[in-house]
Image: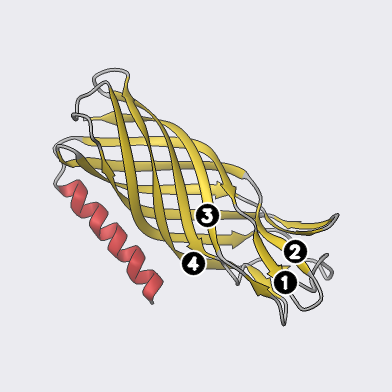
Amino acid sequence: MRIHTIGLLACTLGLAGLGQAQEWEIGGIAGAGFMNGNGISTAAASATTGFKTGGAFGVFAGSNLYPHLSGEIRYTYQMNDLKISSGGTEATFKGISHAIAYELLYHPAPRRSKAQPFAAAGAGIKIFRGTGKESAYQPLSNLAYLTKTMEMRPLITAGGGVKYRISEHLVFRAEIRDFITPFPKKVITPAPGAKISGWINDFVPLFGLAFTF
């Protein structure tokens, strides 16, 4: 229930921000996600588990709320296979994720500047999905199971970048985000007696184009 509430709040804030728009901005982005590995261990063994590097694609819509503050609602789709590795042994499993967030962007430069750096922070939800084909045997299953299931986790975003105005209505963006979530322990399920440590930091550099009107 708490996760659904966070998602509803993010979307509500996003729509409220768009409703106050004096200048709108919509666009698309593409890049890749690089996630940290998390340790998993039992009394007898240990490994690193998490998600492999993969492509990221998204769309966003935003508006200028104040001279140096704007709001954006954004969706990001990522292709990040599940993995667990120890020594020379590795198991992988197809996986994807969907992130929906509302962010506030602070622009120190004037709104119509040619180059406009910004810092961003926000919150929302991220849905992890294992999409591979399950088998009777998986390497390192004494530590964790890579599963064909879905899990929703709360999401915190932080990052920044720069907007460069190519023309009156066309803007190039280069940016990076850190998508921070608790570890999805249903998609990567610890074996009995195993413990997974930490949260996930998903660093996502992105490039895109936006139209303003």
Q: Secondary structure at mark 1?
A: strand
The residue under label 4 is which amino acid type? Met
Q: Residue at x 72, y 77 (%)?
A: 191
Q: Residue at x 72, y 82 (%)?
A: 192
User: In whole angstroms, how far apart are the C-alphas of marks 3 and 4?
Assistant: 16 Å
State which tag comes first along the sequence, 4 or 2.
Answer: 2
Q: Residue at x 71, y 60 (%)?
A: 48
According to the picture, the residue beneath numbered tag 3 turns out to be 201
Q: Secondary structure at mark 4?
A: strand
Image quadrant in which you'd find residue 211? top left
* Residue 147 visible: no
According to the picture, the residue beneath numbered tag 4 turns out to be 152
According to the picture, the residue beneath numbered tag 2 turns out to be 47
The residue under label 1 is which amino acid type? Ser
User: In whole angstroms, how far apart are the C-alphas of marks 4 and 1?
Assistant: 24 Å
According to the picture, the residue beneath numbered tag 1 turns out to be 41
- Residue 69: x and y in percent read 20, 42
Crowding near the residue tagged with mark 3, few <14, some 14–19, many ≥20 C-alpha atoms within 10 Å: many
Q: Are marks 2 and 1 in contact (CB under 8 Å)?
A: yes
